[in-house]
Image (spheres, rainbow, N blue to C red):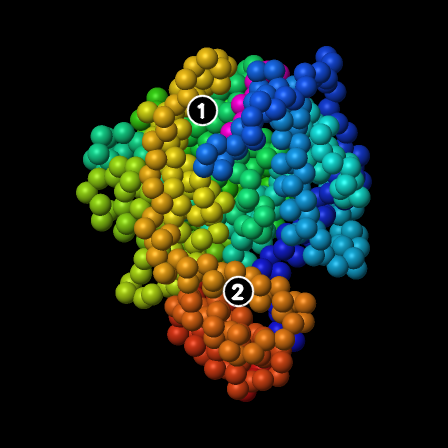
Amino acid sequence: MALKKRYRLVLIGIGVLLLLYIVFYLLVSVSPPEVSGSDLEVERKQVGENHYVLGKNSLKKNEYGVWEMYVEGDAYHRGQAIGKLSEELIYFQESSFVEEVIGMLPYKVMMRFLKYVVAWENRDIQAYIPDEFEREIYGISKYCSDDFDYIGPKFHRKLFYHSAHDIGHTVQNMGLVGCSAFSAWGRHTVDGEIITGRNFDFYIGEAFKKNKLLLYMKPKKGYAFASYSWPGMIGVLSGMNEKGLTISLNAGPPEMPRSAKMPVSLLAREILQYASTIQEALEIAKQREIFVAESFVISSAIDGTSIIIEKTADTTLVVQPQDDLLFCTNHFQSEAFAEMESNVEFQTISSTQRRMNRLNLLIKEKDSLDVEASVAVLRDMGEQEEKALGIGNEENINIMITHHSIVFQPEKLLMWISVGDSPMDAYVAYDLKSEFARSSDSSTPPIEQAKIPASDWIRSQAYTNYEFYYSRYIEMEKGIDADKVYSNKDFDEMISKNPKLYKGYLLAGEYFQEQNNCTLAVGYLKQALTKVIPWDKDVKQIKELIRACE
């Protein structure tokens, strides 16, 4: 029988790996850190609709639907403040995560993998995580729900959830991750200053990205910073500090982790909190060990330039800009890593090199970049090499599974953040200098935020068609797993709303092949082969399904 759809495979793959991490933590008796002083005794107060305060800390949902949180103090109390302020949001996030990932794992599959856990050696993950971050995570865990204690103790769970991005690497060839980023300055921008843009493509179901959170943090040590992710996350995926240093994560070529070390989001957090220059960022990166391949795109207002730090489990290298430009997708570019077997293979089987070529083309087509032009690049769903790709194709810069999209202006301390479900929605500017001044002084008037409106595409028939296609595709994908019956007319209706994308044809072909209706199956599969297919494994699967019918 043909393999079921990619969505289910991704969830099962990541779920098994996450389970291994949880059980490992239990076996090695991970212990909560020691904390000094008393618990945070201040009570959360509601001062308005979706607006809460806890001493000097606060949480508010803004008019664009983004949750804004401000926390300060020592690590343990910062964590407690995060936990108290966003207890309901953290519950929703964990519930969504468990339902989408761990909830789909068959019991026998889970048990089968337990035996591999005990064979892992040197897995003392706590040795690789700074005490400060452990205390912060522990503070948050005090407010996690008992409902998920069957998975593991609260601190264990919160610790391992920070590895979700890393573990996504190991199933990256299933299409879970497809981040794209660029940075430009000098003659390539209207004022010569740095503009850095990125799409963070990380998908674990629609519910998981429902509550987006912009976290402002003023730690006792280090620099104040802002980061954009989800409730309960203290690691950094995309962020900027008060010195105008920005960082974003881009998954490198996927490899199976050899041992549990520092999650990359926590390394990005450490850099953002403690580095003001590129050299300081590099020194921190060299001191830490991680367990996956990762690219860190870093821009610095002080240095007036950007670099990429490419890092594996045991090596840290730097990609320098060429002609005041940097591009980053999901493969390594440094000379030493370029010929690495996994790197070469991933460029062959995925869209990463073609997305980089696309970024290069889009940037160089423009005379000079401003924020609007940068957003236009991140919204790219255009045609490549005169071939129509279809909306949601991983060969586009905008692949429509984006958790968030950001444009940084480091010298201006501005972050332009997407506030909807995709880069096609509006971007809102956050002035970090003003925001941090306002956060600790409630008498400071609110900032009038600049805004880039949503794309006109959002109001078009094409968008309505895509929404129908997307919701129907997900519904049918899950329905097939539940043994629901569909006709070719059902598939044709779905495909007609996004006919240039190969995925609908592949879904139909798989379904009818499993139903032993080879006439319909081969018809759909041959149509899929006429489309642009970014993943080599999908091409191979389609051809195997056709051969099975013939």
Magenta-highlighted residues: 68-76
Left or right of residue 98, residue 66 in this image? left
* The disc label shown at residue 91, or none: none
- Kind of residue at disc 2: Tyr
Q: CA distance from mark 2 to mark 1?
A: 40 Å
Residue 80 can be seen, yes or no: yes
Q: Position of residue 394 (x, y in %)?
A: 43, 57
User: Toward which corner of the image does residue 518 lie, by quadrant?
Assistant: bottom right
Residue 268 can be seen, yes or no: no
Residue at image point 62% right, 19% down: 54
Q: Position of residue 18 (x, y in %)?
A: 68, 47
- Mark 1: give few (<14), some (14-19) or many (20+) Cα within 10 Å: many
Q: Nearer the viewer, residue 248 or 417?
A: 417
* The disc label shown at residue 241, or none: 1
> Height in image: 404 above or below 521?
above
> Height in image: 137 above or below 171?
above
Left or right of residue 315, residue 23 in this image? right
Q: Position of residue 513 (x, y in %)?
A: 58, 79
Does the magenta stretch mainly form a helix, a strand or a loop?
A: strand
Q: Position of residue 521 (x, y in %)?
A: 53, 80
